[in-house]
Image (spheres, rainbow, N blue to C red):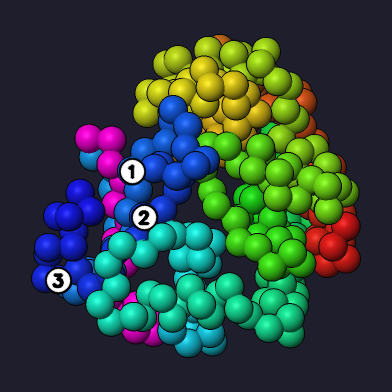
Amino acid sequence: MAEKLISDRRVRAVAAAGSFDTDDAWSGSIPTFVAFERGVSSVQDDTRTGIRVIRFPYEQLERWREWDEIRSEAPLGLLATSRALYDPTGYFARIQRQLWNLSDERRADWREETLRSVSEELTAAKQSFRAGGAGPAEQITALGEARRWATEQLYPALLTHAGLWPEFELRLPHAWRAAAGLKFPKSVYLLEQLYGFGGRDEARAALLATRGLKMMTQEKQARAAAEAGYYDGTVRFLRDETYLHHREDIARWPHLSGMRQNKLSVLLGITRSPLGPAALKVAEELIGAVREGE
């Protein structure tokens, strides 16, 4: 696939991403490529025959050479940790040099900007509970949003204290323990509190609960992680994927059948994780820990 992308004259940069064909590869690693292509108007993320290709418009390759542009709209971790395979303009190399050589001031500014954005969303979520009338859907949504903030924004912000950028894949909990567990134990503890991990037994229960919920693709990926021993990675992935793909079920929670509620409860970790205001409280504590680098 790399050769096919490189030979396409519309493609102006290609990079390999993820752990496939690296020293950190595992049985669930799949070939993943990042491409910047003329004629593409928006991000396209496709996986076919076991190969994932993430396409970006060529214009972004040009624009993201500037920090003020890349900081607000680009997937910084993906760009920083990918490995260039084809870069005739040198623009991709420039993007990576910029990300890995940011000044302490710029890292701090980006971290604070990220924390401010999450804090604003957190404040809005708190206000919805103060208004009263919150039911199961709102309780579960608060947990889902707290997890989203934690993994997509707060964890990357935490790593800026160490000059690192995150890689996102099924083994994320294991990665954040390795990258941040010793240096930032409080933040990692709060991250894990949101997910309610339970080792092998919880991973097995979550895999069983996917049946009948149209999650065959997710179940296959998660099972590969469980078979390799990444039990908490299995659970984190299924929790986040369930929240992403079953928002309608969550909104209709009181009207679901008991069996469907039970399956979704296991997948979302409802009995093992803080809900509603309690989840928002953990997110608030995590913001403080990330700000202080704890």
Quadrant of residue 86 in the image?
bottom left
Please say whether residue 59 is one of the residues in the magenta stretch.
yes
- Determine crowd level at label 3: few under 14, some 14-19, many 20+ residues with C-alpha closer than 10 A: some
- Ranked by sequence position, the earlier of labels 3 and 2 is 3
- Ranked by sequence position, the earlier of labels 1 and 2 is 2
Q: In this image, 126 relative to 186: left or right?
A: left
Q: Mark 1: which amino acid? A: Pro
User: At 34% across and 80% down in the image, what residue appears?
Assistant: 90
Q: In this image, 2 relative to 233: left or right?
A: left
Which residue has dot 3 on it? 10
User: At 54% across and 61% down in the image, what residue appears?
Assistant: 77
Do tag 3 and tag 2 residues touch (Cβ < 8 Å)?
A: no
Which residue has dot 2 on it? 16
Q: Position of residue 91 (x, y in %)?
A: 36, 80
- Determine crowd level at label 2: few under 14, some 14-19, many 20+ residues with C-alpha closer than 10 A: many
Asked if residue 291 shows in the view, the reply is yes
Q: Position of residue 196 (x, y in %)?
A: 75, 30
SS for callout 1: loop
Q: Mark 2: which amino acid? A: Ala
Estimate the spatial distance between the alpha carbons at disc 3 and disc 1, rounded to whole Å: 21 Å
Out of 63 and 16, give the one closest to the viewer: 16
Estimate the spatial distance between the alpha carbons at disc 3 and disc 2, rounded to whole Å: 18 Å
User: At 28% across and 82% down in the image, what residue appears?
Assistant: 89
User: At 38% across and 75% down in the image, what residue appears?
Assistant: 92
Out of 179 and 113, give the one closest to the viewer: 179
In the rendered view, tell whether residue 190 sits above or below residue 59.
above
- Ranked by sequence position, the earlier of labels 3 and 1 is 3
Q: What segment carries the magenta color?
A: 49-64
Q: Position of residue 31 (x, y in %)?
A: 33, 43
Which residue has dot 1 on it? 31
SS for callout 2: strand
- Determine crowd level at label 1: few under 14, some 14-19, many 20+ residues with C-alpha closer than 10 A: some
